[in-house]
Amino acid sequence: MDITQARKNTIDQQIRPWGGLNYIANNALRNIPREDFVPEKYKNLAFADIEIPLNNRAKMLSPKIEGRLLDALNIQKDENVLEVGTGSGYLTAVISKLCKSITSIEIDEDLSVSAQEKLNSLNINNTQLEVGDASKGWSSNDFFDVVVVSSAVPKITGRYFHLLNVGGRIFVVEGKGKNMSAKLITRLSEHKWETKSLFETRLDTMQGLESNASFEF
């Protein structure tokens, strides 16, 4: 496989045609070696338009979803990001090139450890990985400009929305079954929010929320 060409094809044939038009984000997607984050038995599918299994519960997002969410969020160099669901660590690595810092929480300790090893191998040092169950709520002394939720939630509630700075954005896929929609939630002011539906899709539901519980952030 010509890795350089495969990365270029992923941008040109999957991400851009599906609305992932953010040039800076696409460069980050191209420059982080996606193939290094894919389990060995799926290496030949590293650039395929599919969700790649990481274990019996977790999957990597497809390239076009990654491109589209990064386009919508338009992450800036001075922003702090929270990622819910580290997974392979690939998207974490990509976002690290776009922001000031990223905190990523993962329920599976093995995945978190593996992701940290890969980030270390790339000398990425503006990330903080934590092991925890985000479905039980989130508490932090930090404030964030961007939140990326990398699995679906039946419903998102705003109990912790105060952790998002004014101007901050949340990407989340909300819904259940075949009725799921990717949404961008923006904090316009202290008490005003805007929700924009981006596209219809389907992701696996976040572990712990399979019984239709809401995700509190």
Image: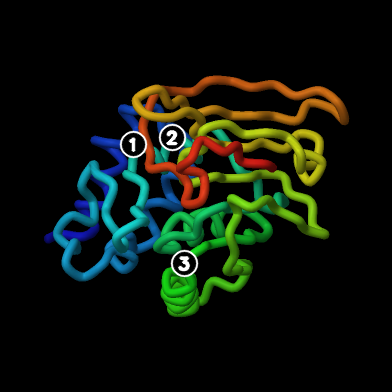
Q: Quadrant of residue 33?
A: bottom left
**Amino acid under disc 1:** Ile
Residue named by callout 2: 68
Q: Nearer the viewer, residue 89 or 24?
A: 89
Instruction: Identify the element where label 3 is drawn.
Output: loop
**Amino acid under disc 2:** Arg
Q: Indicate left or right for 87 with 193 as reference.
A: left
- Which of the numbered marks, if any, corresponds to residue 30? none
Residue named by callout 3: 108
Mark 1 vs mark 3, foreground winner is: 3
Residue named by callout 1: 15
The x, y position of residue 55, in whole percent, is 30, 63
User: Residue at horizontal 36%, vertical 47%?
Assistant: 61
Q: Can you say which quadrant of the picture contains the N terminus?
A: bottom left
The x, y position of residue 214, in whole percent, is 60, 37
**Amino acid under disc 3:** Asp
Is residue 54 shown above or below 76?
below
